[in-house]
Image: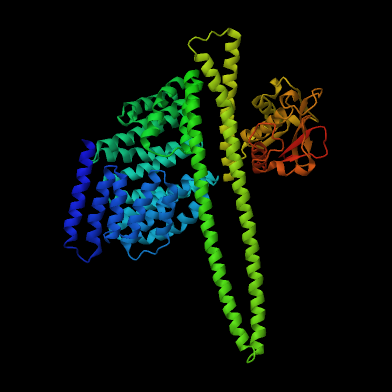
Amino acid sequence: MKAKSNLSLLFVAICLLAITSCNKQQTYVPKTTLADSLIYAATSVQDLDRAVFLSDSLLATGDISIFRHCYMKGSIFIRTGKTHDAEAILKHALAIKPQNAYDSLFYFQCVKAMVEYNRQKNDEEGLLRIALPAYEGLYDLVSKPEYASEAYDILAEILQYVGVSQLNQGLTTEAGKYFDKCYDCILKVKALDKSWKHDYYATVCLYNIASLYSFKNDYHTAEKWLNYTEPIIKEMANKDNVPAVIADMSWCTYYLDRATVYHGLGKQKEADQAFEAFKRTQYAKTDIAKIHEGEYLMKTKRYAQAADAFAVTYRYLAESGSERTLDNVGYLIKKFEANYKAGRNDSALSVAAYTFENLDSAITLEKKNQAIELATIYQTQQKDAEIAEQKAKLLQTRVLALLVALVLAMTFFMIYAVIRRRQRISLEEKNQQLMIANARAEESLRMKTKFIQQISHEIRTPLNILSGYAQVITAPDMEIDNETRNDANQQILENTDRITGLVNKMLELSDVSSRTVIELTDQVPAVQIANQAVHSSGIEDAAHLDFQLQDTDGAGIAVLTTNQQAAVRVLSLLLDNAMKFTAPAEAYGHHSAADNKRATLTITKHDYGIQFIVEDTGIGVPAAEAEHIFDEFVQLDEYYNGTGIGLTVARSLSRRLGGDVVLDTTYTAGARFVFTLPCNW
């Protein structure tokens, strides 16, 4: 019945358009006002396919501008996961200059959607390149009273995205300035327009800012922005025409954010009260709210309750209608982690198997997207070739003309010869640059493809093991002794840890690419960093080698000003490397079984600071590969499992800490990596 009602509403709207088209006026605004009503009716009932069809029809009849059309379709494509289509149509709109204030309004709506798209794909540079010029241009539009409130709304969201980008790059002060400008725009909108819609947009902006500070563990600042949000929600909820679901959803989000902040500040009693208030809202019963509830419960270590909340994950992904992307796999990983930490091994195994199926689909989709990108590159190259061919024909025509004029003007010919020579050199240089760029693109594609294959293999192996043991344990007629059951449980724990570690490495690689600034505010002794890294890597418990931690010249007591978590992670990665490449020879069949495997971590003083030297008697690294091994996805020995990103992450983190990681090529008994951190003596 609901679907029929929605279709009826859309049918009536189209009939209204047909009737009014018979007496169409020449003024632009009345037609657009009616078209806006029709588009709003279509999107309100969530009939997005018909909304796209309606937008195409209204554009064809001239009832909406190209900017209104591109904004609507681009927004729908982003919501439905068709990011390539969204990017293409929004770029088309941004390439056109608006002719009037109304067009400018939707032009900047397209700018906002494009900024949001760049934020989703973590393209900080692209975001700022689009947002900053628009930020200046919007101040002209807000001077027009009829568009001021909408323009301030757009400006507030763009300022919010700029602030988020600055904060992610570690520019805390600059981010705060943009966020304050965003709040100033929100207050101006409230003074201009008292409708609940602007209040709702304001709360969304403020929630996003508060949530980001919570994610950065800056709970005091997050609390400040939630305090800004609370009076706006109260005012909106008291308005007569606000839909009950909007008010309920706003309170729901507010209470959960408030619970997260209180938990981060150590105010657990207040956090529990806020969480109970969240549970009392109607919106808390929706699938997406359940997933957010599960994320909060994971933070508070209530894993069993979190697992219950994540029970709706499958249904949410199915009903959302989005493609099986690597981002959506993240929801499944959260569900898996909750069940695993809650001790629900059977459920965790089931989620792991389902995740594996979705991962295959996500990898296939990623390859498809890469194929689309390659097709675009190929089409661009074809166009370049056509342009080059046209230039060559033009040159031939000029040569013939010059040959005819040679008898009359030798001087002119000499001047032309010089010009032609310069053009040829320039063309050759451009061709060489194009060849180099093409080679780089091909190498990048090859490395991406190899990485995807490695990731697929790395996850497939432990999941196959988990699946095998699950079948054995759950077989109804299978009788298993305690020793076999204990071994199966151990294998399940090891392989789940292996999957979790791999996902964490992938997230670390994404952070490496972002080049985010690391704050150096921790005062920590060098030996504490070493001890935490040893514990984190588990190298002391490795049965196949002897490990020693050595402190020379009292270097371990030196206090470093650094980022403790990042420094420990660098050293842990180097110890993991040593532990892996000193594995028992019989596991790989190409080393002597008589090798005496050992590893040493030495802390020593250096002219520039403190050095952590990780030395092992493993397979070693050829001197010629001393720099190559730090490149992404590089693996010198294919007999060993891995993704080839550990050393890349280690070097990137070390350099962002002001130090470095290098391979000592003078050591030939295995591998020796030197991790240096600056220290003021």
Q: Residue at x 17, y 58 (%)?
A: 20
Work out which residue is located at the far bottom of the displayed protein and give it: 408
Nearer to us in this view, 172 or 393 = 393
Residue 434 sits in which quadrant? bottom right
**Color encoding of the figure:** rainbow
Residue 513 sits in which quadrant? top right
Q: Residue at x 50, y 26 (%)?
A: 352
Q: Is residue 240 visible?
A: no
Along the horizontal axis of the image, is 485 left or right of 672?
left
Nearer to us in this view, 203 or 641 = 641
**332 to 17, vertically: above or below:** above
Q: Quadrant of the N terminus?
A: top left
Q: Residue at x 81, y 31 (%)?
A: 553
Residue 237 sits in which quadrant? top left
Along the horizontal axis of the image, is 323 left or right of 387?
left
The x, y position of residue 202, in whole percent, is 35, 45
Q: Residue at x 69, y 42 (%)?
A: 630
**6 to 34, vertically: above or below:** above
Nearer to us in this view, 217 or 635 = 635
The x, y position of residue 488, in whole percent, is 58, 15
The x, y position of residue 286, in whole percent, is 34, 30
Q: Quadrant of the C terminus?
A: top right
Q: Is residue 539 visible?
A: yes
**618 to 652, vertically: above or below:** above
The x, y position of residue 334, in whole percent, is 48, 29
**629 to 188, vertically: above or below:** above
